[in-house]
Amino acid sequence: MKENLKVEIPNMGDADEALRLFRDLKYLNLFADELFVYASDNLVTREPRIISFDELRELAKPREYLDENFKLVETNQPKDGWRLVPDGAIVISQTHENEVPFFYKSGMGSFMVFNPIEKVWIESRFFLTSQFHKILWQRNPQQETIMEKKGRFLHQDWMDKHIEGVLIQSKLNRQPDFCDIDDDYSFAYFNDTSREFRLKPKTIQIGERTIIKPIDVKPERNTKYYFPSLHSFHKYDNYSWQDTDADNRIFNANLCHLTSVDAINHCDALLELMK
């Protein structure tokens, strides 16, 4: 049940705006005198709380809430038990079923957790990982709201794949090797400007070795690709894809890789098979 309120009218003509805002808030009983506009929804408790005009305008603004099923709702009429979504929040999660869930947002390479008592964001000391946190709600990056789009991860598409259970890999831009993204990885990785991602490649068996399967889709023009070279000291060679006859011969021989590491492993498997 809504509380009884009254707002001081600072200027002539403000009464009409105050009455409109109270109607937006679905107050049933409204009246005004020379100094105040009154709004009552509870006839038992007659003493109204005094609020400023700015407070009334804030009350009347639709805000984002999570309902009892953690569905996002925009309204200025939240039901009892609905959670107000703090600005910037992208995830609400809990570590155990009976524990209070917390809102998180992405920070500079880390996560921030919302302190509901002080109503401020503070840096989280814990990794927000799907192994220890049950995600109850995550902001849909495609969802347009009355608020500006906010809370997106830098690599949102890859984060969505990870949450859906798609096998993906990541590496720092200057590192040669990709590593599997598993449940021990912090979600902050998906907001790291120095990281790149890819789908986990399929593998094939050559002798006793398991290697990354050569690509089966021709790369875009000017893409550097790598292939095993048995006579090279480095065990690989590379070209820039121009769709030439030479490019296509290497591709059709199932030798094309997108990293030098994969080409070297392919070469090692072939050399071992010939021993």
Image: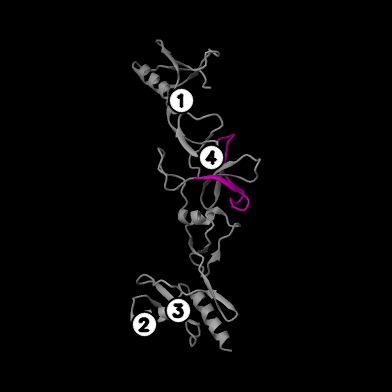
Disc on the earlier residue, 3 or 2: 2
Instruction: Identify residue for label 2.
Output: 246
Along the viewing direction, whichever of 239 and 100 lies nearer the viewer:
100
Viewer-side label of 3, 2 = 3
Along the viewing direction, whichever of 20 and 111 lies nearer the viewer:
20
> Which of the labelled discs sits on residue 70, or is there none?
4
For the point 43% across and 81% down, which residue is it? Answer: 253
Depicted 244 relative to depicted 164: above or below: below
In this rendering, does residue 107 appear at all?
A: yes
Viewer-side label of 2, 1 = 2
Along the viewing direction, whichever of 102 and 164 lies nearer the viewer:
164
Disc 2 crowd, CA 10 A, few/some/many (<14, 14-19, 20+) = few
Q: Tell me the CA gap for discs 3 and 4.
A: 48 Å
Q: Tell me the CA gap for discs 1 and 3.
A: 68 Å
Viewer-side label of 1, 3 = 3
- Residue 121, by quadrant, is top right
Is residue 121 found inside the magenta-colored segment of the image?
Answer: yes
Disc on the earlier residue, 3 or 4: 4
Please give the range of residues in magenta. 114-138
Do the residues under discs 3 and 2 have CB atoms within 8 angstroms?
no
Could you say where residue 154 lies in the image, as x and y percent from the top left? 46, 53
**Amino acid residing under circle 4:** Phe
Instruction: Identify residue for label 3.
Output: 254
Q: Tell me the CA gap for discs 2 and 4.
A: 56 Å
Total numbered circles: 4
Could you say where residue 67 lies in the image, as x and y percent from the top left? 52, 36
